Amino acid sequence: MWRASILTLYPDMFPGPLGVSLSGEALAGGTWSLDARNIRDFGQGRHRAVDDTPAGGGPGMVIRADVLAQAIDALPDDGRPRLLMSPRGTPLTQAHVRTLAAGEGVVIVCGRFEGVDQRVIEGRNLHEVSIGDYVLSGGELGAMVLIDACVRLLPGVMGGDTSGDEESFENGLLEYPHYTRPLVFEGREIPEILRSGHHKNIAAWRRQQSEALTKERRPDLWPAYEARLPPPKKKR
């Protein structure tokens, strides 16, 4: 079973969207498990304080190292990667998702306020992960994104083993356009090539579409994809 342990100030946010559709069915079926724990259970004093003012001054509050360390230490040290959702973290990629999905699961810390004391990040070997170049109110939504991306790759969740093989980022390209019935919608027809039944030509068309979309919308991905292409055959 793939196991996700969440440390958060708002455990009631879970499972949230993870409790429906593919991830929800897999959760109910025992393919993966979710354990959301409240950091405030380890808070200081009568009011269970979890944060304090930043050293050196500045706005906002920072989650205390001693409080968060106790919350982390209450979990079994079973080798699962410990992640901290953070806008300054390493960008989450499909390759990283595949690596995480192939393991035993994850421990995810959801930050709040101005962030987390750097000493617990270093002392508990938290790997900071970002889901994009923007700032959210806390790490919970990012944790849900990461977990959903992993769970859908677990065996049996998507059905066929090849269900995700041609999705965006799996081969370094964005995914090609999709069509279905009706044949004509508001004057727009399904491309004739997709109705031809010629699988080799359809595959070539889809690859061309993926390449064109990637060049247009994500030029940052193109050099890495191009580097993986076989060298052109020399003309004799």
Image: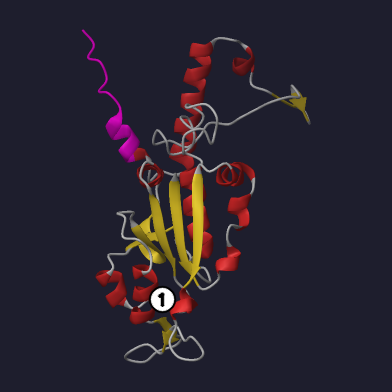
Furthest toward the top, the residue is 236
Name the side, left or right, on which 188 lies relative to 201: right
Between residues 91 and 45, which one lies in front from this camera angle? 45
Q: Residue at x 47, y 40 (%)?
A: 216
Residue 11 picture location, percent across and down: 55, 67
Residue that carries the numbered disc 1 in the rendered image:
115
User: Quick one: 198 or 21, which is closer to the camera?
Assistant: 21
Q: Residue at x 55, y 71 (%)?
A: 10
Numbered disc 1: secondary structure? loop
Q: Quadrant of residue 170?
A: top left
**Left or right side of 17 for 227:** left
Residue 199 in the image: above or below residue 43: above
Residue 2 makes an appearance in the image = yes
**Quarter residue 171 falls in:** top left
Give the residue displayed 39% in from the left and 36% down from the top. Answer: 172
In the depicted structure, whether residue 178 falls above or below residue 219? above
Residue 83 higher or lower than 188, as above or below: below
In the picture, which quadrant includes the N terminus?
A: top left
Q: Does the magenta stretch include residue 226?
A: yes
* Extent of the magenta region: 223-236
**Mark 1 crowd level (few <14, some 14–19, many ≥20, 10 Å Cα):** many
Examine the structure image and report whether residue 58 is included in the region drawn in magenta: no
